[in-house]
Amino acid sequence: MTNKRSNSFRRAILQGSRQLKGCNLRDEVGLGLSQRLVRHVAYETLPREVDRKWYFDSYTYCPPPWLILAITIAEVTVFMYYGFKLDRLVLQVSSPSFLKSPLPYHPQLRAQAWRFLSYIFMHTGIEHLSLNMAMQLLVGVPLEMVHGATRIGLVYVCGVLAGGLARSWFSPGVVGFLCFALSF
């Protein structure tokens, strides 16, 4: 990334910085939990203090970061469904009926294109699901707060599709699913 800014963006920042509070964003006290989260996101994702202050003052929580939360809830729901169906929450992939479900990648069923995307809902056990949830929530939600659901959704789906296609290319005969880590 070149850190170049368009003229309209520079004008918006300059206009916004005139309306900002004079103190440093880190020095502000008496912030609620949600305001501290926005401040943390600003410091972790934006390089300049002016950008951070502008983002902090202009963030409206509307729309809230819903996409990564929805994906995480869907993953937990599918995991619990198969956990109750198979009567096991650990090493679900060792069950033959788990691999016969419509979600995991199967080399003989490549014509079913949804399998290149649906494997994200498959997890080996609680540890795998927990690590995946933690990464999505700790990385994905702050990025969605800054960049929006559309951009993050596009990056997420492209990463999932690339992972599925890579699995098909490099391990063409292996039945199962691909452990996908957030590609942000």
Image: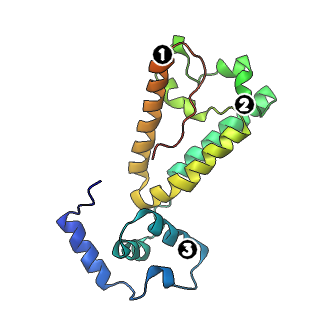
Is residue 49 visible in the rendered image? The answer is yes
Q: Tell me the residue that label 3 is attached to.
A: 36
User: Looking at this view, is 58 or 140 the one in front?
Assistant: 140
Q: Is residue 87 left or right of residue 44?
A: right
The picture quadrant where one finds residue 153 is top left
**First-in-chain label (2 vs 1):** 2
Q: Nearer the viewer, mark 3 or mark 1?
A: 3
**First-in-chain label (3 vs 2):** 3
Name the residue at 45% across, 80% down: 25
Q: Tell me the residue that label 2 is attached to.
A: 82
Residue 149, horizontal then vertical, whole percent = 43, 52
Whole-number angstrom distance, CA of label 2 to CA of label 1: 23 Å
**Residue lying furthest right:** 87
Amino acid marked by disc 2? Tyr
Q: Tell me the residue that label 1 is attached to.
A: 110
Q: Is residue 90 left or right of residue 67?
A: right
The picture quadrant where one finds residue 173 is top right
**Residue lying furthest bottom:** 22
- Mark carried by residue 56: none
Does residue 99 sit above or below 163 in this rendering?
above
